[in-house]
Image (tube, rainbow, N blue to C red):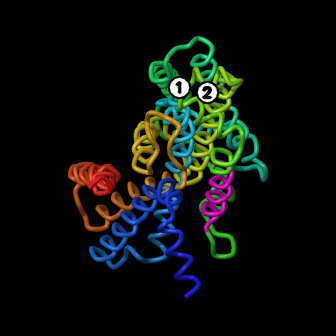
Amino acid sequence: MKIKSACNYIFKDKYFQNRYGNVMLIYAFLLALIVAASLFDENFLTVGNFKNLLLTSFPLLMVAFAQGMIIFTGGIDLSLGATVALSNVACVLLMNPDSPVGFVLPIFGGLGVGLCCGIANGVIISKAKIPPIITTTATTAIYEGAALLLMNEPGGKIHRPFAKFLTGDVFHIPVALFLLILIFLFVRTLTNYTPYGKALRAIGGNESAAYSTGVKVDRIKIKVYILGSLLAAVAGIFLSAQMFSADPRLGKQYSMNAVTASVVGGILLTGAVGDLMGTVAGVFIISVINNMLNLIGVSSYYQFVFQGLILIVVLSLPAIKEKRAMN
C-alpha cells in the first residue's frame, strides 16, 4: 500500500509531470514497440538479440548524447557523423595487431581526432560567429574528405583482444553496457545537476541574457563542441572493434539519426529544454524499429517508410498530450 501511495503521489505531482511527462510517454511507446516486435518474431526477446541491439545502438547513443548537449545551447553539429568516420579510420590505421599494447595509441589517436574536430567547430562557431549549421556543414565535408584521403575504401586490421573485450562480456554482462551506464551518468549529471549544465541551457534559452548574467558563452560553447566530438570519437573507436575494420563512409547515417533520436526523446531544437534520459529511449526506438523489420524480413526500401511513419507518431505524442490537457 505504501508503494502504491508513493506511485500515486509521484504521477499526480505537477512538477514530476511537467519535467518527465514527455519522457514517460516516449518510454511507454518504446515498451509498446518491444511488445509488438516480440509478437512479430519470437526471437526478438532473446538474450542474444538484446545484446545485438545494445552493440548496434551504442555508437548512435554516443553521438545522440553529443548532439543533445549541443542542441541544449540552441546549436547543432552536423559533422558528428564525419567525426565518427575520421576517428574510426585514425584508430584502425594506428592499430598494431601484433603488439600486446597495440590498441593504446589508436585509442588516444581516435580521441585526439575528436578533440581537434571539436576545437575547430567550437572556435569557428563561438569566435567567428558563423552559425552552427553552416560551420558544421562545411567541416563535415572537410572531415569526410580527410577520412577518404587516409583510407579510400573499407579495410585495416584490428587488435583482436581489444575488439573482443569491447564487444564481449564481463561476468556475463556486455562491456558496452558498463560503458553506456558510466557515460550516461556522466553526461546526464553534467547537463542536469551542475553549473555547466545550467549554463548550457541558459545559452539555449536566451544567449544574450546568459551573457549579461556573466555566463562565459564562448568558453561554454567551445567545451560542449569538444565534448560532443570526443563522444563521437568514442563511437568511432567502438565501431572499429565491432566491425574489425574501418570505413571512411560509415558516418553519414549518424548525424541525422542523432538529431532524430534527440527530438524523439523530447529535446527541443530551439534549445534549453529536454533530458538525455529521453534520448536513450529515442535511440532504442530507432534501433528496435530497424531490428524488428530486419527480423521479419522487410525490404530495406520499405524500412525507411516504416521508420518515418513510426517516428511521426512518436513526435506527435507530446502535441496530443497538450491538446488533451487543454480540453
Q: Residues within 10 Å of mark 2 (few under 14, many from 20)?
A: many
Residue at x-position 53% and y-position 43%: 63
Badge 2 amino acid: Cys
Percent coordinates x, y for residue 157 in the rendering: 60, 46
Q: Which residue is mark 2?
A: 117
**Quadrant, the C terminus:** bottom left
Q: Which residue is mark 1?
A: 143
Which badge, 2 or 1, comes first in the chain's sequence? 2
Percent coordinates x, y for residue 83 in the rendering: 55, 33
18 to 194, vertically: above or below: below
Residue at x-position 52% and y-position 60%: 16
Percent coordinates x, y for residue 215 in the rendering: 69, 26
Residue at x-position 65% and y-position 52%: 183
Dominant SS of magenta comes to helix
In-image side of 192 versus 279 (left or right): right
Give the residues drawn in magenta, as a range: 174-187
Residue furthest out toward the top: 128
Percent coordinates x, y for residue 166 in the rendering: 64, 58
Q: CA distance from mark 2 to mark 1?
A: 8 Å
